[in-house]
Image: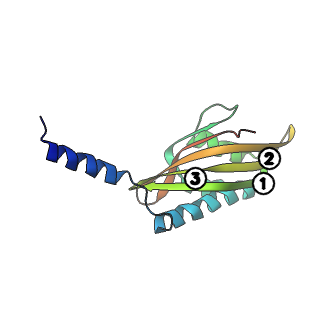
């Protein structure tokens, strides 16, 4: 049995490890910058920039699409089958937990495909992990509620 004082120290140490870092921290500023890089990469069709932003084990899950890994996700952009005229995020909320971060927000995009123009209004969640640099390892987007 763990003595009450040790249990309290254990609970406090776990709680302190999960407290988000201040919104004006350098990590939050860097993640905000990376969100801009992500958006611009889609508009400019810059698969190399996205490749650098994505971890090798990326999983992307989007409304009405199959689950994609990094190669599949980048392959769509590289193929030229989809071009983005608009890729804008808003309502960003960034939470940093040591070497992990969760970014949520709203995504509005306009894409051109062989079938024509489509507009998406989604809510999204990205999970970043920091090794030497911040990289996206999970990205989920679903239709925003009306």
For the C terminus, give its image quadrant: top right
Residue 48 shows in the view: no
Label 1, secondary structure: give it.
Answer: strand
Does 61 sit above or below residue 43? above
Residue on which the image places disc 1: 86
Q: Position of residue 42 (x, y in %)?
A: 70, 54
Q: CA distance from mark 1 to mark 3?
A: 20 Å
Instruction: Tell me what residue is drawn at x 54 percent, y 61 percent.
Output: 31
Instruction: Tell me what residue is drawn at x 58 percent, y 65 percent.
Output: 33
Front-lying residue, 81 or 62: 62
Q: Position of residue 135 (x, y in %)?
A: 50, 54
Q: Position of residue 1 (x, y in %)?
A: 11, 34
Q: Residues within 10 Å of mark 2 (few under 14, many from 20)?
A: some
In the displayed structure, does residue 119 sit left or right of residue 38? right
Q: CA distance from mark 2 to mark 3?
A: 20 Å
State which tag comes first along the sequence, 2 or 1. 1
State which tag comes first along the sequence, 2 or 3. 3
Tell me, for residue 111, which label it has, or none: 2
Label 2, secondary structure: give it.
Answer: strand
Does 25 sit above or below residue 50? below
From the viewer's perspective, is the residue at label 2 or at label 3 nearer?
2
In the displayed structure, does residue 59 sit left or right of residue 115? left
The quadrant where residue 72 appears: top right
Q: Residues within 10 Å of mark 1 (few under 14, many from 20)?
A: some
Label 3, secondary structure: give it.
Answer: helix
Residue on which the image places disc 3: 51
Q: Are marks 2 and 3 in contact (CB under 8 Å)?
A: no
Front-lying residue, 140 or 2: 2
């Amino acid at each position: 049995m763990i003595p009450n004082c040790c249990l309290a120290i254990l609970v406090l140490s776990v709680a302190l490890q999960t407290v988000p870092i201040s919104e004006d921290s350098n990590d939050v500023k860097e993640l905000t910058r990376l969100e801009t890089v992500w958006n611009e990469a889609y508009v400019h069709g810059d698969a190399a920039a996205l490749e650098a932003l994505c971890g090798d084990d990326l999983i992307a899950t989007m409304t009405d699409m199959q689950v994609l890994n990094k190669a599949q996700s980048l392959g769509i952009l590289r193929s030229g089958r989809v071009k983005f005229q608009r890729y804008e995020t808003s309502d960003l909320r960034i939470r940093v937990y040591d070497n992990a971060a969760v970014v949520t927000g709203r995504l509005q995009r306009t894409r051109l495909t062989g079938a024509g123009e489509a507009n998406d209004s989604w809510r999204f969640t990205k999970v970043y992990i920091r090794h030497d640099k911040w990289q996206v390892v999970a990205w989920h987007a679903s239709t925003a509620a009306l």
